[in-house]
Image: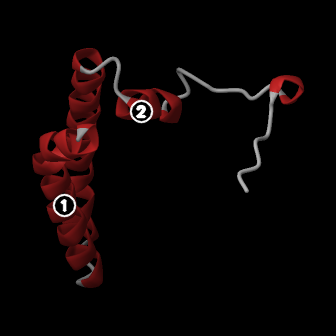
Amino acid sequence: MDWLLLKSLLKPVDDSMAYYSKKIMEYNNANNREAAKALYPKMSSTRMEGEKVEEEFIKSNGNSYVSLDLLMERGIVSTLIDPSRLSLYIIP
């Protein structure tokens, strides 16, 4: 459920990124490098918008596994397994 919520919050950002990516590819295929280059700042700001959406999601959903995953992706949180404390349970 949390993943679906985040996905719905990010949809406008994802749609914009897809649009800019498509336009950049079209411009590059048409050898219009200047037009493609002009879209890079827009993509960058859109990416930053997505990061803000994720940050708000983390703040609002601190107990979510999705928030933990986002924090791990950013290198803010890590999980370590201590082999000396690991127990394996074999289910017959």
Q: How was this image coloured? A: secondary structure
N-terminal of the two: label 1 or label 2? 1
Q: Which residue is mark 2?
A: 70
Residue at far right of view: 84
When the figure is inspected, residue 66 is found, relative to residue 90, above or below; the finding is above
Q: Secondary structure at mark 1?
A: helix
Q: Which residue is mark 1?
A: 20
Q: Quadrant of the N terminus?
A: top left
Horizontal relation, residue 9 to residue 57: left or right: left
Q: Around disc 2, counting alpha carbons within 10 Å, would you say few (fewer than 14), some (14 to 19), or many (20 or more)?
A: some
Residue, x 71% and y 27% (percent of image)? 80
Q: Nearer the viewer, residue 92 or 43?
A: 92
Residue at far front of view: 92
Q: Amino acid at mark 2?
A: Leu
Q: Quadrant of residue 17?
A: bottom left
Residue, x 50% and y 36% (percent of image)? 73
Q: Around disc 1, counting alpha carbons within 10 Å, would you say few (fewer than 14), some (14 to 19), or many (20 or more)?
A: some
Residue, x 27% and y 58% (percent of image)? 37
Horizontal relation, residue 66 to residue 76: left or right: left
Residue, x 21% and y 31% (percent of image)? 53
Is residue 45 something that shows in the picture? no
When the figure is inspected, residue 25 is found, relative to residue 80, above or below; the finding is below
Q: Quadrant of the C terminus?
A: bottom right
Residue 2 percent coordinates (x, y): 25, 37
Say if mark 1 contacts mark 2, CB within 8 Å. Answer: no
Q: CA distance from mark 1 to mark 2?
A: 24 Å
Residue 32 percent coordinates (x, y): 23, 74
Residue 63 percent coordinates (x, y): 35, 19
Q: Nearer the viewer, residue 60 or 63?
A: 63
Is residue 7 something that shows in the picture? yes
